[in-house]
Image (cartoon, rainbow, N blue to C red):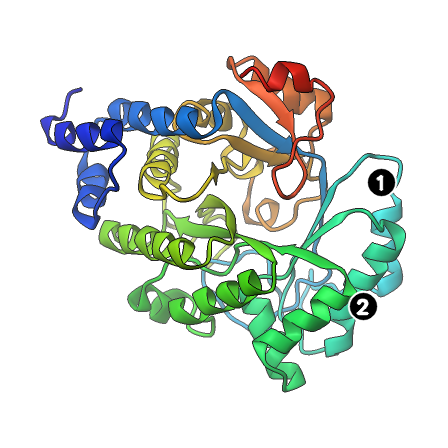
Amino acid sequence: MTDSNLKRIYDKVMAGERLSFEDGMTLFNSNDVLTIGEMAHHIRVQKNGLKTFYTLNQHINPTNICRNDCLFCAFYRKDGQEGAYRMSLETVRQKVLERIEEPITEIHIVGGLDDGLPYEYYIDVLRVVKEVRPNVNIKAYTAVEIAYLAERSGKSWAAVLDDLLEAGLNTMPGGGAEVFSERVKRKLFMDKLSADEWIEIHKIAHQKGIRTNATMLYGHIEKDEEKVDHLIRLRKAQDESGGFLTFLPLLFHPENTRMARLPMATGVEDLKHIAISRLLLDNFDHIKAYWVMLGKDVAQIALSFGADDIDGSVVEERIYHMAGARSSQMMTRSQLKKLISECGFVPVERNALYQSVNTETEIIDQV
């Protein structure tokens, strides 16, 4: 330990005590990343042992046309702009059929807020996917998209979720949270939900039995105190509803955005955010190190800094690659297992609810 200010936090972590806002600020202000990582690894092992989760999944982004104008987004286009697209339902069907021979357990669906598509399109996308793959878990539509669909249809958030459930929705991603800061919202994503609205939609989903993920976008103009507040608000929401599955710290990729002059966070900063998330979010079972976003090397190191999930096979990820991500578009099951096991961890293939679908259960249960 090179930072004596961490001694008090270290003692709290080892005693299993909840960290405070002030503790969070101390962690962000410290450069002793190895000690922060050691504490996070302690919690990770307590919760999940050496198990590291991955899944065989597919990403489908039905449209990148969006009425919002977020400064940090390289994915969206305006209708008629070069690069803009919207998939027909038949194209969505073909996307699923292209990988029908693979044992995919989860299909992740998010896109733009496209005024050129009717409300029913968003519902029918799920129906098409479920028709082709009736046993897959559909993880679809952020809270921002849910609010948009409610506005378009004149329905309540709860009613929209009911329609999506009927069409095949199983779980929800955590996108659209960005940072729970009105200051940042005014500057970067004025048209999106407030923090309270984002949390409320997730709580409604939890009440309906829809498990969801949570995220935080870092590496742009946010301040440390805003990130700590974000994490503690998520922790409070989890205390109340218990419906969050995992937390994903999202690294901002500035390339091809209107914030392209900002430097991207370093690998050390990535590890620090993952570790601090693990320490503050004591009621979240899982922290994800998304290999597409971080790159394979940093994702591997993150497994010793509190992360216990690296996401999955993916294929045709658009959002980060349109923002300049240099990672590959997919990994096979054997590549994912190798990525995990060569770091000394045990790969566990999971479904969307973190239930093991491995065959080596006798080995996993001993870890």
Total count of labels: 2
What is the three-letter code of the residue carrying label 1? Arg
Q: Can residue 31 be seen in this view?
A: no
For marks 1 and 2, the one nearer the N-term is 1
Q: Position of residue 222 (x, y in %)?
A: 30, 54
x, y percent for residue 40:
34, 29
Badge 1 element: loop
Left or right of 148? Residue 190 is left
Query: Crowding near pointer 1: few (<14 within 10 Å), some, many (20+)?
Result: few
Residue highlighted by disc 1: 99
**Position of the N terminus by quadrant:** top left
Q: Which residue lies furthest to the left in this view?
A: 4
* Secondary structure type for disc 2: helix
The quarter of the picture where residue 317 lies is top right
For the point 76% across and 67% down, the residue is 166
Q: Mark 2 points at which residue?
A: 124
Residue 293 versus residue 364 in the image, above or below: below
Q: Is residue 124 left or right of residue 158?
A: right
Horizontal side of 341 relative to 123 (left or right) equals left
Q: Mark 2 belongs to which amino acid?
A: Asp
Return the residue nearer the eye: 205 or 105. Answer: 205
The residue at 58%/75% (across/down) is: 157
Q: Is residue 100 above or below residue 154?
A: above
Picture quadrant of residue 145 = bottom right
